[in-house]
Amino acid sequence: MGNFNLKLATLCYVQRPGQTLMLHRVKRANDYHEGKWNGLGGKFEPGESPEECVVREVCEESGLVCIDPALRGQITFPNFDGEADWYVWLFLAKHWTGQLRDSLEGRLAWIDNDRLLELNLWPGDRMFIPWLFEDRFFSAKFLYEGGEFQGYEATFYGQDGRIERESYVHRVKAAETEFVPVYEPVDDTFCWLCGGEVTKRHCKIICTQCGFTRDCSDP
């Protein structure tokens, strides 16, 4: 198994009509989430259930006490921060008591639900936040490498017993891929724009039909 490091945590999205409470991570030094917006939550303490953990964490970070938060999904983040695999239980909390207070973790704000995805979120969060509001439980794995999103795998469990799966793989940009151009003499025998005949003049290829001009392909 090697040096397998495991961390357990909860993440909660506290609701009021039309809005969700979000935390802007701008206060802590050396915060891996610095500048990002998150729900509220944190790591388990010994002996806690997911429900006990999320109620405690939300109260510590906001002053609000969640009443019967609903478990909506679970996500595994392998080697997310370069130090550990994170296993996170995700909750919605529509019922709560208490008064909102300042958080040591960041700036709290009520955000309109239709603007949540406009925030500076982790790329994976943009994908799973809409799942929280669907009538199906989900279990997923989100892959990051050096802070860059690589893709996910997810399984959804519907209330009707239906099980659905989906996945996404980040496609590498062409600029990130080593590319060695291959020149063929035929490349300089036609116009790349219209396909017409061309003439070669001073290492320039000039189309006799449309006038498109380019450099020769050969070195």
Image (cartoon, grey):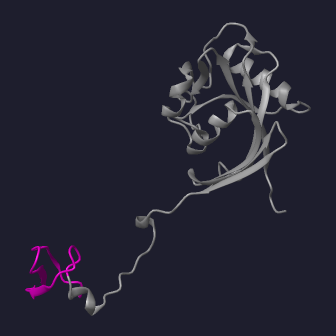
Where the C terminus falls, by quadrant?
bottom left
What's the magenta region?
191-218
Tell me where residue 74 appears, x and y as whole percent: 77, 41
Nearest the eye: 9 or 5: 9
Relative side of 27 to 60, left or right:
left
Tell me where residue 129 appears, x and y as whole percent: 63, 35
Please report the residue visible at 65 percent of the width from the left and 40 percent of the height from the top: 128
Please report the residue visible at 13 percent of the width from the left and 73 percent of the height from the top: 212
Nearest the eye: 46 or 132: 132
Q: Is residue 202 magenta?
A: yes
Relative side of 40 to 187, left or right:
right
Q: Residue furthest bottom?
A: 185
Quadrant hosting residue 116: top right
Q: Residue furthest right?
A: 47
Asked if one can make out residue 110 in the rendered structure from this viewpoint, the answer is: yes
Task: Please tell me whether residue 214 is drawn above or below residue 30 in the rendered image.
Answer: below
